[in-house]
């Protein structure tokens, strides 16, 4: 209900509820599957509920549609037996809403059980391949269209399905503060590509290095794009500080600060929102070496132009690359968000280029999105409008295959279904 009616993030609302509920681990895991799947499947569940009831779920009061979406999740996406799902849905409706809705909930949840998910997808198929793929994989059509535009319809199906698998938490050691072996000793498995990362099921706070701030939680894709920029800047061997222009909450800044410290470089971390700038300061606090956090609009920065040997521009984006972690977000974003984001992305990239040293400053343009308008289109615009050359980003990550994309295949696009990471995009530019 918090997600449906108050705009809460499912993962945060659930963590809060679980911390107050005294559940055994198995029940907590089941609650997680219920909440994630109910939020993630929302549009598909509503299409099925419309067909099963003859009414639009948006016409019902919010608690009714939430109970019935939860029924869909149980009946169509878990092994909960139909009768148990119907009984618990009716009991929940009686308890939370009132006797008057139990007949509706009973009738509709029984009808949901008329087909499995594939059966409903066949029943509701329109013949429009993208709409049918979107329904089958629980995404809005525009997101299916974006991925099909990048990957083709068949591979887009695999990418969309990968969005529905919650990832195992990925941990990262802070260079200079902890060794990967500490994470492995705590039961983690080394990441495939990042030398700093390891995955470990369960609560990251149980790992001593995480608890004392010598390691953090960060998707492997985020680690890799930070590493690509750092390696390229180090190979260019220009002296001078590094900048993270859009640093909040500080994941990439922490990795960059650790790498900068190994060369006695200053890292400056900018962030427009003061509360997020404070999060960056907390993330950087344990890191040795020289770093500063500046609460500033990256488009009107307080530092002198041309100050930095390397600039990370990890710009605000649609976040469609991290749908695995945010079950409800695919239904909140719309295609109409993208032009506004693209305008901001271009402004921030222009400011990042301006902040880089002339004659060789390296800029990393990064999004957690595979949407063409936020990635390849912004890079094409930069190559036309800004005084930059496109560097070979995949060459900075030779251990990663299947990521090269864009002009002369010089950009990186990671994918959950290919690399097991978020769908991070990275272009490396050099200021002329
Ligand atoms: C994709 S997030 C960055 C994630 C971060 N690099 C990390 O790895 O933890 C983008 C950040 O840019 C910030 N931001 C948005 N507009 C900005 C602006 N005009 N100047 C600087 N930062 C901005 C947002 O508040 C957000 O924290």
Image: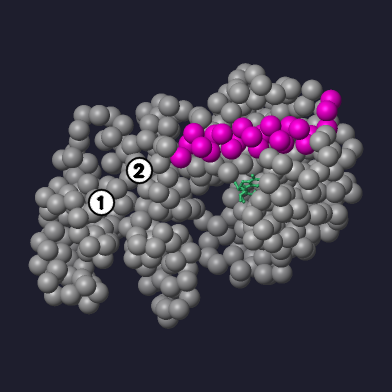
Mark 2 — residue?
Answer: 139
Rendered position, 421 above or below 89:
above
The magenta span reads 337-359
At a point 20% along the width and 33% down the height, the residue shown is: 126
Secondary structure mainly formed by the magenta segment: helix
Q: Nearer the viewer, residue 39 or 234?
A: 39
User: Horizontal and vertical percent for residue 140?
Assistant: 34, 41
Give the numbered dot on residue 45: 1
At a point 18% along the width and 51% down the height, the residue shown is: 56
Rendered position, 47 above or below 400:
below
Side (left or right) of 258 relative to 52: right
Asked whether 174 falls inside the magenta stretch, the response is no
Q: Earlier in the sequence, mark 1 or mark 2?
A: 1
Which of the 4 image quarters holds residue 104?
bottom left
Query: From the image, which quarter does the N terminus lie in?
Result: bottom left
Q: Residues within 10 Å of mark 2 (few under 14, many from 20)?
A: many
Say which element carries label 2.
loop
User: Horizontal and vertical percent for residue 427?
Assistant: 65, 31
Q: Residues within 10 Å of mark 1 (few under 14, many from 20)?
A: many
């Amino acid at each position: 209900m918090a997600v449906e009616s108050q705009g809460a993030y499912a993962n945060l609302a659930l963590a809060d509820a679980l911390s107050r509920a005294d559940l055994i681990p198995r029940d907590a895991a089941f609650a997680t599957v219920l909440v994630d799947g109910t939020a993630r499947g929302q549009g598909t569940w509503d299409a099925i509920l419309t067909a099963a009831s003859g009414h639009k779920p948006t016409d019902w009061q919010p608690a009714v549609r939430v109970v019935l979406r939860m029924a869909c999740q149980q009946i169509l996406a878990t092994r909960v037996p139909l009768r148990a799902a119907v009984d618990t849905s009716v009991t929940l409706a009686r308890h939370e809403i009132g006797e008057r809705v139990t007949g509706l909930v009973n009738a509709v949840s029984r009808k949901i059980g008329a087909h499995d998910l594939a059966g409903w997808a066949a029943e509701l198929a329109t013949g429009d391949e993208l709409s049918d793929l979107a329904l089958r994989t629980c995404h809005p059509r525009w997101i299916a269209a974006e991925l099909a535009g990048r990957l083709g319809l068949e591979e887009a199906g695999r990418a969309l399905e990968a969005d529905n698998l919650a990832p195992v938490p990925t941990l990262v050691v802070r260079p200079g503060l902890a060794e990967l072996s500490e994470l492995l000793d705590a039961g983690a498995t080394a990441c495939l590509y990042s030398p700093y990362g390891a995955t470990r099921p369960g609560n990251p706070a149980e790992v001593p290095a995480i608890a004392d701030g010598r390691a953090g939680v960060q998707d492997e894709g985020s680690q890799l794009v930070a590493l690509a920029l750092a390696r390229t800047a180090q190979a260019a061997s220009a002296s001078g500080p590094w900048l993270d222009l859009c640093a909040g909450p500080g994941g990439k800044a922490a990795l960059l600060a650790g790498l900068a410290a190994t060369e006695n470089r200053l890292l400056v971390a900018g962030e427009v929102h003061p509360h997020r700038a404070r999060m960056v300061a907390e993330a950087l606090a344990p890191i040795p070496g020289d770093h500063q956090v500046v609460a500033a609009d990256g488009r009107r920065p307080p530092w002198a132009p041309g100050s930095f040997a390397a600039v990370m521009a990890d710009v605000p984006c649609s976040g469609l690359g991290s749908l695995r972690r945010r079950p409800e977000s695919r239904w909140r974003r719309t295609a109409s968000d993208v032009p506004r984001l693209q305008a901001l992305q271009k402004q921030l990239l222009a400011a990042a280029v301006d902040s880089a040293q002339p004659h060789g400053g390296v800029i990393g343009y990064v999004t957690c999105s595979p949407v063409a308008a936020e990635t390849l289109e912004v890079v094409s615009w930069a190559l036309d409008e800004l005084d930059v050359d496109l560097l070979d980003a995949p060459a900075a990550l030779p251990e990663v295959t299947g990521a090269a994309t864009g002009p002369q295949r010089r950009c990186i696009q990671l994918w959950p279904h290919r690399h097991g990471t978020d769908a991070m995009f990275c272009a490396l530019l050099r200021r002329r």
